Image (cartoon, rainbow, N blue to C red):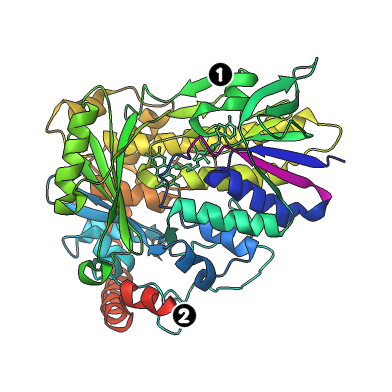
Amino acid sequence: MLGSVVIVGGGTSGWMTAAYLRRALGDKVSVTLVESKRIKTIGVGEATFSTVRHFFDYLGMAEHEWMPRCNATYKLGIRFENWREKGHYFYHPFERLPVVDGFPLTDWWLAKQPGPRFDQDVFLMSSIVDNERSPRFLDGTLFEQEFVERAGDPARTTLSEQSTQFPYAYQFDASLLADYLCEYATERGARHIEDDVLDVVRDERGWISHVVTKEHGDLTGDLFIDCTGFRGLLINQALEEPFVSYQDTLPNDSAVALRVPVDMEKRGLRPCTTATAQDAGWIWTIPLYGRIGTGYVYASDYCGPEEAERTLREFVGPEAGDLEANHIRMRIGRTRQSWVNNCVAIGLSSGFVEPLESTGIFFIQHGIEQLVKHFPDAGWDPGLRSSYNTAVARVMDGVREFLVLHYHCAARADNAYWRDAKTRALPDGLAERLEQWRSKLPSTDTIYPHYHGFEPYSYLSMLLGLGGLELKPANAVSLMDDSRAADEFRRIKDLSHDLVKRLPSQYEYLSQMR
Ligand code: FAD
C-alpha cells in the first residue's frame, strides 16, 4: 500500500490536488502540501472550462458557498472579437449543436443562411450572453432543462466519461479559490507547511526519497507531486525530464496582466470570457464580481513588453490608471513525461498552452483525475505510469492542435503576425484534417482522435466564426426537405427571446446569491 503523498507548491494546482486526493482517497493516504511564502503563485488563471463543474460537484462544494467567497461569475462561453476582421465577433459557447435529420445544424445553416450570425441562429447561448443574462432563474433552476442536475451523482466524477455538456463554466479569483481549497483540504486532514524546498534528494535508483526544507527539515513520502509551476522543480530540475516545446506552432510566449476594480452594477456583468485579437496576440477580459482580470498574451518576436503593456492600458482605458502590471514569461509545451519514477507533475510544471480556451485548470483537473485512476501501489506497475503519461500528453497535444487552428483559420491577415500564422508549421495531422474539413465539416471521426476536452461542435463554432477556411455543407442537405431544420431555427429564435425576457441579469442573480 502506498501511504503518503507530498505535494510541493500551493497554487491552484497544488490545492486542487490536495483537496481532490483527500476527497477521493480519504485517510488511507496522507497528504502533505509544502508551499513557499516567498515564491508567489503565477497570479492569473481565472477562467475555466465547463467540466470544472464536475470537480466542484465531486468535492461537494455548493455554488452559493464557494462562489461568493471567490468573487466567482458564470461563463457561458468565449466571445472572440476581431479574429475575422475588426468589429466582428462570435461566441464559442458550452452548447452542443442540435442535429436535424442526421446533420448538425451548422450544415443546415451553411446551406440555408437563415440569418447573418451563425452563432445566434444555432445556439441559445449567444443571445443570453449578448444580453448579460444569468444561466439560472432567481429560484436557482437552470435555464437548460435538458441537463438534469443530480447532486452527488457518483457517476459524474470524471471528465472523459461525461455524456452531458454542462452549459457553463466559472470565472473566479484564483488566489481566493486556492485559500478556499486549502481550508477544504486541511479540514479533511491534509497537512500544510509554509516553507521553502531547498533540495530534492534522490536515492540510488534515481527516485525521490525526500525534499529538504529550510525550516521543517526533510519531508519524506512515497509519491511526490510537482506543483511548482513553470520552474518544474522536481520533474524538470531534479529528475531532468525534458520539456517538449510547442513554440514552433504556437509562438505566443509572454503576457502582461492587470487586475482592474470596476463598478459591476454600472458596467453590467457579461457572462463570458472575451478574447480580443490584437496586432501580436490577443487580450483576455474576464469579469469577476467586483473586478476585471485582463491581460495581453503576445509573441515576443513581434512585440516588446513595453508596447504590450501600453496596448493593454489603452485597451482598458482610464480604469487602468496606475495599477501595477504583472509581466509573465510563459513556457508553452509539455514535460515529455509528466510521471517519472515516483514523481508526478500537475499544473504548469506538467504543461501549458496559452490561455485562449482557458484550459490550464482543465489540464490540472484531468491530471488529478487520471492520477486517481492510475494510482500506484507498492508494486509501482510501470504500465500505470505509461498509461497515465499517454493520457496527459494526448490531452495537451490535442488542445495545442485546436489552438493552432484558431490562428491558422482566422481570416485576419493584416500584419506580419497574422500572415505568418497562415504559413507556420502545423502539428502533425492537422494539415490533413484541415484538407478533409474543406470537403466535409468536422465530425467525431475527423477531429483529433483522442480525448482532449473539445468536441466537433467546438471545431465547427471556431471554423464558422474565424472565417478563414472555406466551408461547405453536406451536399445532401440541399436536396433534403428542410422543414424540420426551419422548425429548429425557429425554436432557437423563439426560445432565445423568451429566455432573454425571463432570466435575470447575471449581476442581479449573483448579487442575490451574496
Ligand atoms: P503556480 O501558480 O506558479 O504555483 C507554484 C507554487 O509552487 C507556489 O505556491 C510556489 O510558492 C510554489 N513553489 C515554487 N518553488 C518552491 C519551492 N522551492 N519551495 C516551496 N514551494 C515552491 N488557466 C485557466 O484555466 N484559465 C485561465 O484563464 C488561465 N489564464 C492564464 C493566463 C496566463 C498568462 C498564464 C501564464 C496562465 C494562465 N492559466 C489559466 C494557467 C493557470 O494560471 C495555471 O494552470 C494555474 O494557476 C496553476 O498554476 P500552478 O499551481 O501550476 O503554479
Quick check: 274 above or below 417? below
Check disc 2 and report its element: helix, strand or loop.
loop
Please give left or right for residue 236 compared with residue 257 in the image.
right
Q: Does 439 appear in magenta? A: no
Quick check: 281 above or below 115? above
Q: Which dot marks residue 414?
A: none
Q: Residue at the spot x=15%, y=50% of the render?
A: 317
Please give left or right for residue 329 compared with residue 376 in the image.
left
Nearer-N-terminus badge (1/2): 2
CA–CA distance between discs 1 and 2? 48 Å
Q: What type is the residue that disc 2 sits on?
A: Thr
Check disc 1 and report its element: helix, strand or loop.
loop
Q: What type is the residue that disc 1 sits on?
A: Pro
User: Which quarter of the picture shows residue 416?
Assistant: top left
Q: Which dot marks residue 141?
A: 2
The residue closer to the viewer here, 67 or 437, is 67
User: Which quarter of the picture shows residue 411?
Assistant: top left
| Mark 2 residue crowding within 10 angstroms, few (<14) / some (14–19) / many (20+) | few
| Mark 1 residue crowding within 10 angstroms, few (<14) / some (14–19) / many (20+) | some
Number of labels in the image equals: 2
Q: Which dot marks residue 242?
A: 1
Q: Which residues are magenta?
A: 28-40
Q: Is mark 2 within 8 Å of ligand 1?
A: no
Please give left or right for residue 413 compared with residue 217 in the image.
left
Q: Position of residue 463 (x, y in %)?
A: 29, 45
The residue closer to the viewer here, 404 or 18, is 18
Quick check: 510 above or below 114? below
- Picture quarter with the C terminus: bottom left
Which of labels 1 and 2 is toward the front? 1
Q: Residue at the spot x=19%, y=65% of the render?
A: 114
